[in-house]
Image (tube, grey):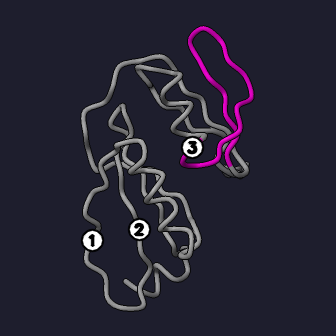
Amino acid sequence: MSFKVKNINHLAFACEDLEKSTCLFQHIFGAEHLKTTSEERFLKLADFWIVLIKGKPLEKSYNHYAFQVDPSDLPEFEEKIKSLNLTILPGKARAVGENHSIYFYDYDNHLFELHTGDLQVTLAET
């Protein structure tokens, strides 16, 4: 019997302050709040959902979550990230014409990337 994964169902993030993290996802990513429980927040983002679960912050690492964005939207994303006093990391050096990214940690050390390319373009660049 053959089977395969269809798609990403949801992402779950351990967060120390659910209210603060909910605001971050709404402010930066435009996530829609769906439901609140005592230990969780459910948000909708693009074609999947996110669960914020009460928990301790992570150790920082390069494991990250990348979201595709339009190049023209990068300045607005950067301003939103800065408005929450989050640290934007230096991106990797890229040649002129390549895709661009913004990397930043949230309050609980989850690393996010806002990337302007898609898989086809990225594979052609490497």
Give the foreground label among 3 and 2.
3
Give residue 95's quadrant in the image. bottom left
Residue 102 sits above or below residue 86 on the image:
below
Nearer to the camera, 74 or 6: 74
Kindly identify the amino acid type of the residue bearing the numbered disc 2.
Answer: Ser
Few, some or many residues within 10 Å of mark 2 (<14, 14–19, 20+) = many
Few, some or many residues within 10 Å of mark 3 (<14, 14–19, 20+) = some
Nearer to the camera, 120 or 93: 93
Q: In the rendered image, which residue does mark 1 sit on?
A: 92
Secondary structure at badge 2 equals strand
Instruction: Name the image quarter holding the C terminus.
Output: bottom left
**N-term-proximal mark, 3 vs 1:** 3
Q: In the rendered image, which residue does mark 3 sit on?
A: 27
Residue at the spot 57% in from the left edge and 66% down from the top edge: 69
Position of residue 19 measured from the top left corner of the image (x, y, whole percent):
53, 22
Secondary structure at badge 3 equals helix
